[in-house]
Image: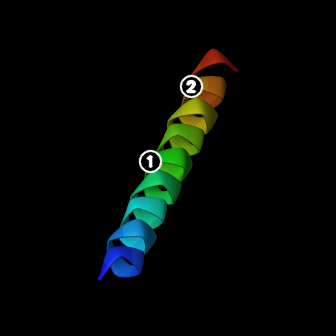
Amino acid sequence: RADIRYRQLNDNRQLLQSQIELEQKQNDLIIL
């Protein structure tokens, strides 16, 4: 079903987004 695949795409995008945010927070900590 297409909507399941679409939901997986959304989950992957959210995972990527949270990973990016985590890396940015770590970079901020290193800068401080």
Query: Quadrant of the rendered structure where residue 11 is?
Result: bottom left
12 or 30: which is nearer to us?
12
Residue toward you, 15 or 4: 4
Residue in the image at 66% along x and 26% along y? 28
Residue 14 position (above or below residue 25) = below
Q: Which corner quadrant holds the C terminus?
A: top right
Amino acid type, mark 1: Leu
Q: Nearer the viewer, mark 2 or mark 1?
A: 1
Task: Where is residue 5? Give x, y as percent.
Answer: 32, 71
Residue located 63% across and 30% down the image? 29
Q: Secondary structure at mark 1?
A: helix
The quarter of the displayed image where residue 3 is located: bottom left
Instruction: Relative to 29, say whether 14 is above or below.
Output: below
Left/right placement of residue 14 relative to residue 2 reads right
Answer left or right for 23 relative to 5.
Answer: right
Question: Which of these two is toward me, 14 or 3?
Answer: 3
Residue at image coords 59%, 41%: 21
Residue 27: x percent and y percent?
56, 25
Find disc 1 in the rendering and name its residue.
16
Q: How is the image coloured?
A: rainbow
Q: Which residue is mark 2?
A: 27
Image quadrant where one finds the N terminus = bottom left
The secondary element bearing badge 2 is classed as helix
